[in-house]
Image (cartoon, grey):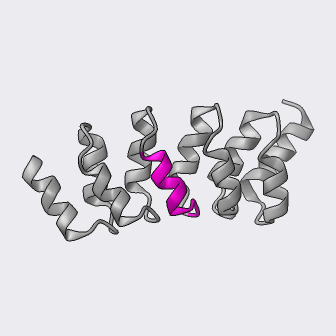
Amino acid sequence: MSKSSSFLISAAESTKNHNVLDKLSSHTDLDVVDNVAFNRSTHPDTLHKLSDHDNLDVVYNVAGNPRTHPDTLDKLSSHPDITIARRVASNPNTRLDTLDKLSSHSSYNVLHNVFTNPSTHPDTLRKIKSRL
């Protein structure tokens, strides 16, 4: 790894500057982009843009980032990869209606994450209990 790549990865991981993070979000180095998606200072608009990324690790980090907009999380709740649905189910920023939708998921791990999400509505918790 070059010094410049190492520096950019570190910057993507630790900077709080929205403009820098937005610029780094389109970098060619996936480690840089992955760290932007993970960074809790990344602006929700940048995270939304990254939610369509081809790399699953990037999308996984978007789904788990508490700054991700609830509309983006709702979109990701239907992602074909189950690990993305699991991250959305555990994200504290996920809307109640999205958590309710995920409570019908076939995966026990997704249901578990909905059940343990502190934002989950009691009616949704009852719905999950009745399925188990």
Q: Residue at x 44, y 32 (%)?
A: 81
Which residue is located at x 25 percent, y 48 percent? 111
Residue 74 image position (x, y, % from top left)? 46, 53
* Span of residues in magenta: 67-77
Image location (x, y in percent) of residue 32: 76, 42
Task: Choose top left, top right, bottom left or bottom right for residue 16.
Answer: bottom right
Which of the 4 image quarters holds residue 67?
bottom right
Quadrant (top left, top right, bottom left, bottom right) of the N terminus: top right
Asked if residue 12 lies in the magenta stretch, the reply is no
Residue 81 appears left or right of 37: left
List x then y, in percent, for residue 37.
Answer: 65, 49
The residue at the point 69 percent across, 63 percent down is 43
Side (left or right) of 50 relative to 114: right
57 versus 100 height, above or below = above
Secondary structure mostly seen in magenta is: helix
Residue 75 in the magenta stretch? The answer is: yes
> What is the total number of numbered labels drawn onto the structure image?
0
10 or 86: which is nearer to us? 86
Where residue 14 sits, quadrant-wise, is: bottom right
The relative height of residue 51 versus residue 122 in the rendered view (above or below) is: above
Q: Position of residue 26 (x, y in %)?
A: 80, 42
Reply above or below: 53 against 104.
Answer: above
**In front of the other: 14 or 100:** 100
